[in-house]
């Protein structure tokens, strides 16, 4: 093969998704901080009438960060990594460029419509799948477009072997497609009865079945949106930024299959002690514990990649972000299985420990990895130095403090709440009324919200740093090979 | 075999898909028949209750309230008999929730009354001092969407054979017949309420969301 | 089909899966190391796909009729 002159990777779609990541990150996290403060100060519920209550905003926060911030970050890095590891430019195919642009615009329309409809209270109530059927169809369209983009690019590749990141992207694509389709099976009521709202629908499944499908989805949506594509990123960005080859490529392959085999069986742990069959619950527990192995396989592989190169941790804040991300990944993949053990779950389920666990993963692992990815991509996409290393360091410490405040307060709150619910007096009567278990948590809610605020402020620092890099960064003449260049 | 998979993205993708789909087939599909059977005496929701259920979903009450009582003494003492699978047979979607910022509501109809709910939705701290629940004043001014609720009942009756119009079961009939039933059920609740706004609207034939959601909450037993 | 039969099939499905999983994963591990030992393929070199990823870098393994894999 001969490299053509003047052929370059085309990052136009990746840039669009980068802007979307920052935009939706701000929206989603801002709403998150608002609802966190609402739990400590209920008066904050009345800032926007009907549209500002905790309950209206909560689906907006979850959907906003998962499908807005996270997904656009995943797409941005796909349109960046995909070309590079396949050694083929988007510019070589008009078709793929059109698909990419279409993918971006349909995505923007879907997410913005989702924001509006969720404010209006149009919801199917299923967590992380609240959108009504017309939007579900739009989501399917955009997912198919992404599929075209992945397999189209693979079709014209120069590199014969698919790099491990590609495996994870393919798995994300397939996993989410399957889960989303099955969980959102619904019957539009207007087309059966001829009356009522045209966009209303009713779930195909009832009761316990609906719950099983939902948590099969809910758990695995976490797998295939919070874990799999983020691993795809770290397998590319950490070696590239540090200049170190993956510690053991074989381990990465093995962990991949381990994760694929095990993850889908673990969804039952969301339904322990519920009315789903016992064996589903037990299996959910067991597989959740086994899941530690492939998860740690990937995480340890990443940490060992830095073997002998720990000096970089001091010199390069991006490495710091990524190493902390894999550490948080280990923490939350250990915490999750612990919560999935039946006796622990009896205490932890329905309490604040669960959102605490989720945020370990999302803030520490996902958020840090995404921001590091965007930081790594910026100098290469815009041919500019990163604007400020100092700001990056400050952001790192502020956000790390925020996360620690978040999860410690939620651990304490969750366990306190769980213990108080089951506490009895000497005669075997319940010791506390429900409201006692709420008021006692208010200080922890304040602490948590403040931790969240720290993280949000850090995200603003990140956004500002990105903005200044793009608008006023020092130009660089050639693409950096490894460590991203940054001004002090 | 492994070489071949590593070299063929298409078959690789098929392999990944089979591996992840298998878990779903074995865990989920087989139980569909059994757990969908309603317990004896369980009735589907009336149209007014469904309208209330839609309001419950619209305002995401399930973000803070569960509807699932686990088989522990501490839970049955607090909320009543633990949940059975067949009790959810007519719940589309299920509303188990995943977080108890507020108490479980599975059997709230057993121990709360219409006027308690009215005060509570208007100003939660007036009946539960220290409550962090927001007030839902807009439920007193928004009109419940009875037609969509009817559409939902009609759909589940037609598509999923939910036993409306069977002996001893709620009546559905045509939209007009159903509206009469709804007004009759709503009249009882409105009579228990204090809000003049709601009463005046009801005289004009309008049912406010608060009436529907109280009907729904009262039906949870 | 009654519930009994379904449960039985479910149990078989589950057991077969577990055995299948163990067999596949171990044979995969074996395959990875054997290939490296016999020199068929060096898996670790694929790490370079990420490290040398400029558009004008030579691919680690190019797609071309010349070095078509014979497996």
Image: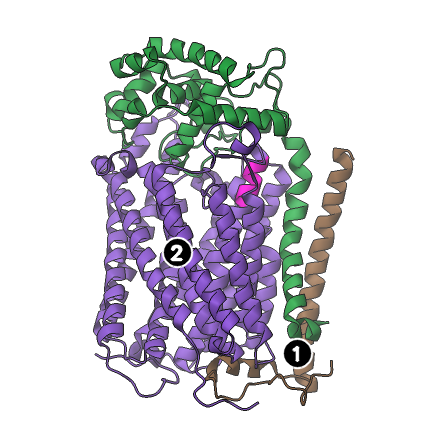
Chain colours: A purple, B green, C brown
* Chain that bears disc 1: C
| Element under disc 1 | helix
> Is-magenta flag for residue A213?
yes
Residue picked out by circle 2: A108
Residue A72 sits above or below residue B169 on the image: below
Residue A433 sits above or below residue A21 on the image: above
As drawn, is A298 to the left or to the right of B204?
A: right
Residue B212 sits above or below residue A335 on the image: above
Q: What stretch is highlighted in magenta?
A: A209-215
Residue at image position (33%, 74%) is A378
In the rendering, at what x and y percent does residue A162 appear?
A: 58, 75
Q: Nearer the viewer, residue A44 or A344?
A: A44
| Element under disc 2 | helix
Residue at image position (29%, 56%) is A26
As drawn, is A42 to the left or to the right of A170?
A: left
Main secondary-structure element of the magenta-colored stretch: helix
Residue A101 visible (yes or no): yes
Mark carried by residue C33: 1
In the rendering, at what x and y percent does residue A436 appear?
A: 30, 30
Q: Quadrant of the N terminus of chain C?
A: top right
């Amino acid at each position: 093969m001969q490299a053509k002159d003047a052929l370059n990777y085309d990052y136009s779609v990746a840039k669009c998704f980068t802007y979307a990541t920052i935009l939706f990150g701000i929206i989603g996290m801002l709403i998150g901080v608002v609802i966190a403060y609402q739990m400590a100060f209920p008066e904050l519920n009345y800032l926007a009438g009907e549209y500002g209550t905790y309950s209206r905003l909560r689906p907006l926060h979850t959907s906003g960060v998962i499908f807005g911030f996270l997904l656009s970050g995943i797409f941005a890095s796909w349109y960046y990594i995909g070309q590079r590891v396949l050694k083929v430019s988007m510019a070589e195919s008009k078709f793929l460029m059109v698909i990419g642009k279409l993918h971006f615009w349909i995505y923007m329309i879907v997410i913005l419509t989702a924001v509006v409809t969720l404010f209006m209270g149009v919801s199917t109530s299923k967590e992380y799948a609240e959108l009504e059927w017309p939007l579900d169809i739009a989501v399917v369209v955009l997912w198919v477009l992404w599929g075209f983009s992945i397999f189209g690019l693979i079709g014209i590749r120069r590199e014969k072997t698919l790099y491990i990141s590609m495996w994870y992207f393919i798995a994300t694509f397939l996993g989410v497609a399957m889960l989303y389709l099955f969980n959102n099976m619904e019957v539009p009521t207007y087309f059966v009865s001829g009356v009522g709202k045209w966009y209303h629908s009713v779930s195909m499944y009832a009761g316990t079945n609906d719950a099983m499908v939902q948590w099969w989805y809910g758990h695995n949506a976490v797998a295939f949106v919070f874990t799999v594509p983020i691993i795809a990123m770290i397998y590319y960005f950490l070696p590239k930024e540090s200049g170190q080859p993956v510690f053991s490529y074989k381990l990465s392959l093995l962990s991949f299959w381990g994760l694929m085999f095990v993850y889908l069986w673990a969804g039952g742990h969301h339904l322990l002690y519920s009315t789903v069959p016992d064996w589903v619950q037990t299996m959910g527990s067991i597989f959740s514990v086994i899941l530690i192995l492939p998860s740690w396989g990937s995480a340890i592989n990443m940490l060992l990649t830095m073997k002998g190169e720990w000096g970089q941790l001091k010199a390069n804040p991006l490495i710091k972000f990524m190493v902390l991300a894999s550490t948080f990944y280990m923490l939350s993949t250990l915490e999750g299985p612990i919560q999935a053990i039946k006796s622990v779950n009896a205490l932890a389920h329905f309490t604040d420990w669960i959102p605490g666990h989720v945020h370990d993963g999302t803030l520490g692992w996902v958020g840090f990895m995404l921001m590091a990815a965007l930081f790594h991509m910026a100098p290469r996409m815009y041919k500019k130095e990163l604007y400020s290393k100092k700001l990056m360091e400050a952001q790192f410490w502020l956000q790390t403090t925020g996360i620690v405040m978040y999860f410690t307060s939620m651990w304490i709150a969750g366990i306190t709440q769980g213990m108080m619910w089951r506490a009895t007096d000497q005669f075997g009567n319940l010791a506390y009324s429900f409201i006692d278990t709420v008021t006692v948590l208010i200080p922890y809610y304040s602490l948590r919200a403040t931790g969240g605020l720290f993280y949000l402020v850090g995200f603003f620092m990140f956004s500002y740093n990105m903005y200044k890099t793009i608008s006023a960064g020092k130009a660089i003449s050639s693409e950096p090979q490894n460590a991203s260049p940054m001004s002090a | 075999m492994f070489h071949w998979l590593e070299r063929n993205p298409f078959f690789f993708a098929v392999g990944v898909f089979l591996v992840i789909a298998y878990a779903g087939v074995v865990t989920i599909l087989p139980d569909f028949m059994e757990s969908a059977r309603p317990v004896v005496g369980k009735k589907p929701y009336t149209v007014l209750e469904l309208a209330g259920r839609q309001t419950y979903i619209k305002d995401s009450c399930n973000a803070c309230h569960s509807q699932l009582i686990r088989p522990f003494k501490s839970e049955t003492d607090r909320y009543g008999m633990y949940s059975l699978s067949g009790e959810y047979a007519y719940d589309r979607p299920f509303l188990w929730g995943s977080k108890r910022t507020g108490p479980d509501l599975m059997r709230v109809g057993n121990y709360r009354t219409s006027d308690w709910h009215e005060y509570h939705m208007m100003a939660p701290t007036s009946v539960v001092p220290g409550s962090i629940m927001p007030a839902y004043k807009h439920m007193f001014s928004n009109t419940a969407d009875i037609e969509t609720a009817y559409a939902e009942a009609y759909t589940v009756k037609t598509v999923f054979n939910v036993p409306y119009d069977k002996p001893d079961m709620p009546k559905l009939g045509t939209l007009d017949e159903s509206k009469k039933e709804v007004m009759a059920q709503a009249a009882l609740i409105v009579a228990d309420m204090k809000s003049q706004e709601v009463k005046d609207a009801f005289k004009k034939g309008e049912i406010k969301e608060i009436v529907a959601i109280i009907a729904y909450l009262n039906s949870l037993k | 089909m009654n519930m009994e039969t379904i449960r039985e099939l479910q149990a078989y499905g589950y057991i077969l899966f577990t055995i299948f999983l163990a067999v596949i994963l171990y044979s995969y591990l074996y395959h990875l190391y054997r290939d490296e030992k016999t020199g068929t393929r060096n898996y670790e070199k694929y790490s370079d796909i990420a490290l040398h990823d400029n558009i004008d870098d030579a691919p680690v393994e190019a797609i071309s009729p010349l070095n078509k894999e014979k497996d």
